[in-house]
Image: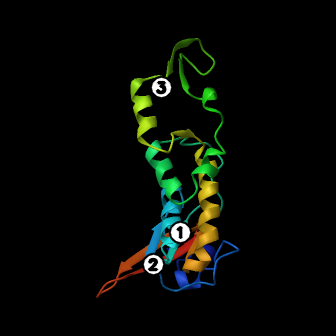
Amino acid sequence: SRLAPDRRPRTLDSVVPCCRAMPPKPARAPVLIAGGGPVGLYTSVLLSRFGVPSILLERQRAGIPHPRAHLINTRSMELFREVGLDQRVESLAPPMREWREFRYCRSLLGRQIACDDHMATPAWDVLQEASPARLTHVSQPGLEEVLREEAARLAPEAGSQLLFGYECAHFDVLPGGGVRVEARRA
């Protein structure tokens, strides 16, 4: 079957960057990142900090506004601290007193069955002493915005590219090493 003109696969060298700060269409990069969620965006940030060019493909043109994940564990916050993003992420979080208790109900508006303060345990105290970072409560769209801004800021100097609104349509492993990727508008 034939694909509509706007759905035909294109090679990365023919894709126009979707981020205004990106350099014009690099044809090659040692790393392709498929997906611009928290892990893909963090990977782009980390690679760019080390000067490794990469190309990130993400189907969505902008982040999905619907909340998904909302707790960022201590280890993730340690990783954000290593790249200088921990304070920006923490600034998005409501005060802990507003989210430390987990309430269990029969339905969304139903009678409360139980309430548990997950931070009122000896394990919580041990964790707080073991790490300079803290578990925090930030929606995934908020976290992705911070990571997207940082990835876009670092990408030009590293020769990286962030392509939002594109997906990996096909890839071929080349003889002798390497991969050829065809991307298309999502």
Q: Name the residue carrying label 3.
A: 118
Q: Quadrant of residue 129?
A: top left
Which disc number belongs to residue 57? 1
Q: Residue at x 61, y 61 (%)?
A: 148
In three-dimensional space, the C-alpha distance between marks 3 and 1, rounded to whole angstroms, equals 37 Å
Q: Amino acid at mark 3?
A: His
Q: Residue furthest front?
A: 129
In three-dimensional space, the C-alpha distance between marks 1 and 2, rounded to whole angstroms, equals 11 Å
Q: How far across and down, in percent of the image, does residue 84 sit?
A: 57, 58
Crowdedness near tag 3: few (<14), some (14–19) or many (≥20) residues, C-alpha within 10 Å: few
Give the answer, above or below, for where 45 lies relative to 80: below
Q: Amino acid at mark 2?
A: Val
Q: Nearer the viewer, residue 59 or 156?
A: 156
Q: Quadrant of residue 16?
A: bottom right
Q: Quadrant of the C terminus?
A: bottom right
Residues at discs 1 and 2 in contact (Cβ within 8 Å): yes
Q: Is residue 4 left or right of residue 32?
A: right
Q: Secondary structure at mark 3?
A: loop
Which disc number belongs to residue 181? 2
Q: Can residue 4 be spotted in the picture?
A: no
Q: Residue at x 64, y 40 (%)?
A: 93
Q: Quadrant of residue 58?
A: bottom right
